[in-house]
Image (tube, helix red, strand yellow):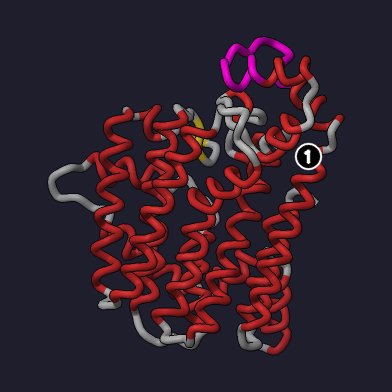
Amino acid sequence: MSRRGDEKTVNRVDKLKPHEQLAAMLADDMAAMNALIRERMASEHAPRIPEVTAHLVDAGGKRIRPLLTLATARLCGYGGPYHVHLAATVEFIHTATLLHDDVVDESARRRGKPTANLLWDNKSSVLVGDYLFSRSFQLMVETGSLRVLDILANASATIAEGEVLQLTAASDLATDEATYLQVVRGKTAALFSAATEVGGVIAGADEAITKALYDFGDALGISFQIVDDLLDYGGATASLGKNTGDDFRERKLTLPVIKAVARADAEELAFWERTIEKGKQQDGDLDHAMALLNNYGTLEETRQEALAWAEKAKQALSALPDHKIRDLLSGLSDFVVSRVV
């Protein structure tokens, strides 16, 4: 290729978003991971398994979690094949949790498409999710690393624990910000931090590096979830893949509402009790909830917290060696919160 052609390619890549640049840089690894996912989601005896799985996998998504595993392994100089297995493991765990979440939340849309439980049924979604969890553990074992197995098994348990905690705390007005953070760390950040940490572990990185990778993933995951919760009260439906206000309609106490409840007067508290705790919602309630959030400035406060966690993620990267991937991971931290900047 000519020098001018090389420059055009570089310019095109530089215009991509950070995760897109990472995907382009790791295109061969991503292709290998996708092939492995296709292979392992197959079932000789139950064709519904690949049907349900393919519906969700083919719906798109940025694949940020498995991309983090591939990127951190490469950053740490790994030259073997098992980072691909771990990336597929992470994606299987994530897909399984989405299938289960949609049943628990009675969701009708995921990534802009009808959910699997809507197209098939709840039983299929739960059982296929279980199958993918089992497949993920098979992939973990193939790496031969007991520490990797420990990290990802712990993450799987923490995710389930976070979901159960959310189930019990979501509509309880006594839920405070500390409990919200515990839920977020469980249901979202646990897989982010496991995805980044195992990339370093499989590469044989030292403890300081793997700890930095864990801290990066943890902070990035928290920022990611806070932004998602914030966008539910102001994001475009097309970009969310769901309807604005779904969390309110599903009676989920997320950070903007928790902050507003903490400052509510008697009349406002009665409104939150009726709509969130009792679920007796009527026309105009979402608009009133939005007005309360804006009056108390809780949407802006939540935005600032998301930005602070993104900054913590970037600070964690300072312990890592200079590398193009490190720069892109830093850019990814900014991208996660760019939706609410």
**340 relative to 324 in the view: left or right:** right
Instruction: Inspect this view and state whether residue 253 appears.
Output: yes
Q: Secondary structure at mark 1?
A: helix
Assess whether residue 231 is covered by the magenta stretch. no
Point 70% across, 15% down: residue? 270
Give residue 332's position: percent from left, percent from top.
66, 65
Name the image quarter holding residue 234: top right
Point 75% across, 59% down: residue? 308
Instruction: Inspect this view and state whether residue 239 appears.
Output: no
Q: Residue furthest left?
A: 45
Say few, some or many: other residues with alpha carbon within 10 Å of mark 1 (under 14 / 14 to 19 / 20 or more): many
In the depicted structure, whether residue 338 falls above or below residue 297: below
Instruction: Report the label total.
Output: 1
What residue sits right under mark 1 in the picture? 299
Assess whether residue 285 is covered by the magenta stretch. yes
Give residue 148's position: percent from left, percent from top.
35, 72
Give residue 25's position: percent from left, percent from top.
56, 76
Name the image quarter holding residue 238: top right
Give residue 292's position: percent from left, percent from top.
80, 26
Point 30% across, 52% down: residue? 133
User: Where does the N terminus fall, quadrant-wise?
Assistant: bottom right
Closer to the camera in the image, 109 or 175? 175
Closer to the camera in the image, 61 or 336? 336
Residue range (magenta): 273-287
**132 relative to 204 in the view: left or right:** left
Point 43% across, 43% down: residue? 98
Residue type at mark 1 is: Leu
In the depicted structure, whether residue 289 falls above or below residue 281: below
